[in-house]
Image (cartoon, helix red, strand yellow):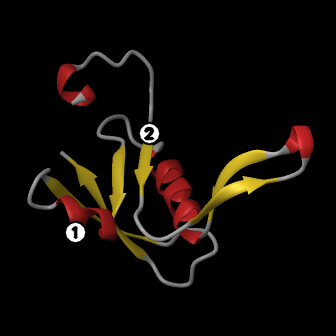
């Protein structure tokens, strides 16, 4: 919706992934924070870094997200990307 309105005045890139994660508080005392950890979080971060390379349509989603939204939001396959720390490339999709 932001892209369609052209009302975003700064660059933003978004990477979205979907899977099970671990969430909760980590740390002790003042250094205790709520966090979310797991491989899906790392993949989402890698997708966001990948999305930074483009001038427009910087909302990139994983195949898992695309499978959830394909009947509601138009996407196009963007190809396969080998992310750091992975041995197999992952399909990513650009939201239109």
Q: Which mark is residue 92?
A: none
Q: Is residue 58 above or below residue 71?
A: above
Q: Which residue is mark 1?
A: 67
Q: Around disc 2, counting alpha carbons within 10 Å, would you say few (fewer than 14), some (14 to 19), or many (20 or more)? A: some
Q: Indicate the position of residue 36 as horizontal and vertical percent values.
A: 62, 56
Q: Indicate the position of residue 13 as horizontal and vertical percent values.
A: 44, 39
Q: Indicate the position of residue 72 as horizontal and vertical percent values.
A: 11, 53
Q: Residue 78 occupies which quadrant of the picture?
A: bottom left
Q: Is residue 50 left or right of residue 7?
A: right
Q: Nearer the viewer, residue 29 or 11?
A: 29
Q: Indicate the position of residue 44 as horizontal and vertical percent values.
A: 49, 57
Q: Around disc 1, counting alpha carbons within 10 Å, would you say few (fewer than 14), some (14 to 19), or many (20 or more)? A: few
Which residue is pictured at 28% across the width and 15% down the height?
7
As drawn, which residue projects farthest toward the left? 71
Label 1, label 2: how far apart the Cα atoms are: 21 Å
Q: Is residue 42 above or below residue 29?
A: below
Q: Which residue is mark 2?
A: 13
């Amino acid at each position: 919706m932001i892209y369609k309105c052209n009302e975003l005045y700064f660059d933003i890139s978004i990477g979205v992934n979907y899977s099970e994660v671990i969430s909760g508080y980590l740390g002790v005392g003042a250094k205790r924070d709520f966090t979310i950890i797991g491989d899906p979080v790392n993949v989402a971060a890698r997708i966001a870094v990948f999305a930074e390379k483009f001038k427009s349509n910087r909302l990139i989603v994983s195949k898992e997200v695309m499978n959830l939204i394909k009947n509601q939001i138009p996407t196009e396959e963007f190809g396969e990307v080998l992310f750091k720390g992975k041995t197999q490339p992952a399909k990513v999709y650009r939201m239109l």
